[in-house]
Amino acid sequence: MEPFTVVDGLAAPLRRDNVDTDAILPKQFMKSVARTGFGPNLFDSWRYLDPGEPGQDPAMRRPNPDFVLNQPRYRAATILLAGRNFGCGSSREHAPWALLQYGFRVLVAVGFADIFRQNCTKNGVLPVELGDAALDILFAAAESEGGCRLRVDLEHQRVTGPGGFAASFDIAPAARHALLGGLDEIGLTLRRRERIAAFERERLARYPWLAASIQT
């Protein structure tokens, strides 16, 4: 997992509350657990006018010109603005995979579903929760003719933007540590490999029969 320090990027405004994980990545695209290739189908039913199925070439489909991510000025966005209860619904981990593979490293919303928030931090996506007033300012800036670039600093837990905008955000210490170090759950476990090996040596010394193999 790539370490997260600072993201300085364009923000795309998704003015919707209660965006569930089936909207983020529809169920028909969840047949793979390879953790790759989900970006083209992010928000699939909103981005395209025709139904989508795995294996289709996105270039051959009809994009929805009214959907925000299809507007040329937002296609390079790395920060997504959203409303309340983003990521509700089922706990599919494919949703943050799709967001990350599309290009989003930061989600800024009024609130997140708990399991979705955890899945994001475990996969290198930073969920930033700000209040209504702050989001109103950011939405207005992102929807303006000049757009909105934000700087999100995880180490100092701070978001800054145009017009002197600045806001602090909270994050669980364990999630912050993992993101800053680029550590998923396997990486966190491997940092304790010496303690794990010492435990195994002590256990086998105490119970040597555990090492015996069964002959067939």
Image (tube, rainbow, N blue to C red):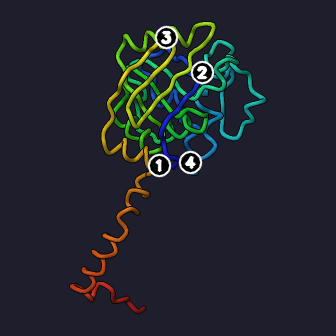
First of labels 3, 1 by sequence position: 3
Identify the residue position indicated by label 3 in the image.
163
Q: Most extreme residue toward the left, as rendered?
A: 206
Quadrant of the rendered structure where residue 83 is?
top left
Q: Position of residue 73 (x, y in %)?
A: 67, 17
* Front residue of 116 and 57: 116
CA separation, marks 2 and 3? 32 Å
Q: Which of the two discs, 1 and 2, sits closer to the camera?
A: 1
Q: Most extreme residue toward the bottom, as rendered?
A: 215
Eyeballing the image, is 114 above or below 10? below
CA separation, marks 4 and 3? 38 Å
CA separation, marks 2 and 4? 22 Å
The amino acid type found where label 2 is placed reads Trp
Q: Quadrant of the C terminus?
A: bottom left
Q: Which of the two discs, 3 and 1, sits closer to the camera?
A: 3
Identify the residue position indicated by label 4 in the image.
35
Identify the residue position indicated by label 1 in the image.
182
The amino acid type found where label 1 is placed reads Gly
Identify the residue position indicated by label 2 in the image.
46
Tell me: 150 left or right of 64: left
* Front residue of 154 and 32: 154
Q: Which of the two discs, 2 and 3, sits closer to the camera?
A: 3
Q: Label 3's element?
A: helix
User: Would you say the residues marked 4 and 3 are in contact, meaning their CB atoms lie under 8 Å apart?
Assistant: no
